[in-house]
Image (cartoon, rainbow, N blue to C red):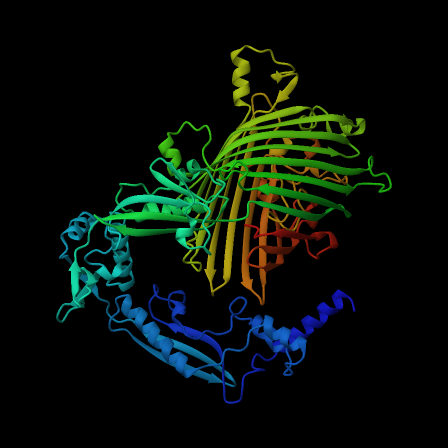
Amino acid sequence: MSLKSYLYIFLISLFAASCSTTKYVPENKYLLDEVKFDTGKKDIGKEELSPYLRQKPNPGIFGTYKLQLKVYNLSGRDTTKWINRMWRKIGEPPVIFSAEETERSRDEIRKYMVNKGYMNADVKVQIDLKPKKAVVTYVVSARTPYYIRTIRRDIEDDSLRVYLEKDSSNTIIKEGMLFDVDLLETDRARSVEYLRSRGFYYMNKDYLYIEADSALNSNEIDITIKSRPILLNNPDGSVSKLPHRRKKIGRVVCIPWYNSEKEFADQIGDTVQYEGMSFLYDGEIQSKPSLLYNKIHIEPGQYFDVRDVEKTYAAINSLSTTKYVNIAFREQPDDYLDCYIQIIPGKTQGYSVDVEGTNTDGDFGAAVSGTYSHKNIFKSSEIFRLKLRTAYQPMGDISNLLSDNSIEVGGEASLTLPKLQGSFLSYDIRRRIRATTEYSLSYNYQTNPWYARTIAGGAMKYIWVTGSRNNERYSVSLVDLNFVYLPRVSDSFKEEYLNPSSSMRYSYEDHFILSSGFTFSKNTQHPNRPVDDFITYNGTVETGGNTLSAFCALIDKEKVDGAYQIGNIRFSQYVKGEFDFSHNLIFQGNNKVVYRAHVGLAYPYGNADVVPFEKRFYAGGANSVRGWSVRTLGPGIYKSSISGTDFLQNGDIKLDLNLEYRFKLFWVLEGATFVDGGNVWTIKSYDDQQGGEFKLDTFYEQIAYAYGLGLRFDFSFFLFRVDMGIKMFDPSQEKSKQWRYPIESDDFAFHFAIGYPF
């Protein structure tokens, strides 16, 4: 049978199984079909109470369609057959209603309400039993909450009292606030971290506690913060109470190539002293002491600071050579701590080969790329990466490989240093920030029936990470040079596309681009709270040609055809900006609604009339409006009628609007439904892109819309994505055909990609 036949059988079977979700519910038992909450309060709802359920219904798509349960029901009762075992493995068995688990859930919900200050809250359970199904409703009566009346500190330890009084203005609990146990615990943990950052190495939450007393005949509570001494068991069986003392760092010893299978004493080989720290090596030095010193923020003679420990963990883990790092402390006399940093290295070299398929106007091609990387090429965690790529795309008579088809050969070499090389910043600042410097060289040769083109480039950029969770990333491209040389351009191509009013003329002449730019990105997702909503921002500003233009003007260089030239080659001058925003709304466990907006603007000026082709925007594809293939939408209402001219479908202004619902299916499969909108436009009017110019009073009528379905195969270490987009509104069509109904065969676009689209 064909693949289509198997698909039909699967869908029919799934529909048959969906007729009954209680196929495997035993007699006198009930499927937990739905759980409801009735709280009577807007600020306490399902999202707050669901985590405290001890028993949840089978998950459903859009909250109702229990696909995983239905897949499980496809199985037969004979578990000796592999097909039945497979359906049961990738599906999910029915959740059988349990009165005991329901009662435990009720208790957990009441505890949550009490912790939130509703000390007299009451939770009742209503159970609605239907044929083989149960609907459970938790009715929560919050009643009058309790508030904090006073906050007092009763700290016996003098050292702790001094520092806690200094920190009192930073406390997050205030008089008059709702008595929230979770908030009290958060503030206690914050106070402990504050003390551990001031030298109190042994401080933990057991030594700092809170007493709460309710005032008589009122809904008010008095808070008292207290401390406990350190208890020491003596040899004679007695217990001594010791005060909390601040600890200083003594020796700092780093073992860069630690072997966890050896005893610590056996790892001491050659000792190298560097800037007051000791580095122990067993044989050849594989990682230079100067590199590691710059990543270690724990300094001899300074008071213990847990923040320095966390910075050291983050900095050493950022090194490409690090597989695992452990930091241990050993107490010494006179309140000193010796610090031992144990680093287990990872593999330094790697190889990969990628094969991909391409499709242009129904002609299938192929591309092969190989990558070699060395993560410690100069013994200081420098990453050297070499990538080679070749591609072949039929564009005519396949028997004539060279003249009638497209061939591409290229490569890129890059070197990443784990520091800000040549930066104007002081040594101390450069040592304390997580940053890298990246150098790259690239070369690409393309040939097809119309032209042969060589693109060579080089770049230098700084990249650094900041933020409380290292969730902010910055990049400054100091120099980015691209040189474009065309040894061959056919006469027919020149006549058709490179006329004086063409938007593409400059892109198919010899030219070079000297640019610099700044990029910023931030992700608010908390690593310890994966079910919380989060936002992602990305922004880029890039400019090119300003330095060269200023230099030419300074030396009073003459213009040729209205533009400066360097070595008889015209250079580009432009400014370009992009901003991307996406918001992930998470609900029902793994289900998400994600919406995104992406805008871009590029403007040529001075020495250029057109933004370089390499810097223009395009629409369509796996991460844009998915009803169109890449570079087949826009600009505006323009549509190319000639095969293979997608190089005309780009613009200077871009807008992408996306809305996607993502849901768990079964096994490693996730599903998605989406709606996309967007297009690109040109700033000026060009003869070869008729209808592509941006106009404020009409651009909104030229926004293309698409909808579709997607599958994601989440293998944890990577996610493979398949999306089917369908055109909804095509602005390039005549008015009567812009709304695409009924759907035609060329209204579909399929996309294969790695990772989520946004």
Number of callouts:
0
Q: Quadrant of residue 85?
A: bottom right
Q: Is residue 66 left or right of residue 634?
A: left
Residue 367 visible in the shown view = yes
Give the residue at the far bottom of this rendering: 28
Q: Is residue 185 left or right of residue 38?
A: left
Coordinates of residue 50 in the picture (x, y in percent): 41, 69
Coordinates of residue 604 in the picture (x, y in percent): 57, 27
* Most foreground residue, 702 or 322: 322
Q: Is residue 23 left or right of residue 48?
A: right
Q: Is residue 226 above or below residue 343?
A: below
* Most foreground residue, 157 or 69: 157
Q: Residue at x 78, y 32 (%)?
A: 450
Coordinates of residue 244 in the picture (x, y in percent): 19, 54
Q: Is residue 129 above or below residue 646?
A: below
Give the residue at the far right of this rendering: 399
Q: Is residue 418 above or below residue 524?
A: above
Q: Residue at x 65, y 19 (%)?
A: 569
Q: Residue at x 60, y 60 (%)?
A: 713
* Most foreground residue, 404 or 611: 404
Coordinates of residue 379 in the picture (x, y in percent): 51, 38
Q: From the image, which quarter does the N terminus lie in?
A: bottom right
Q: Residue at x 50, y 63 (%)?
A: 590
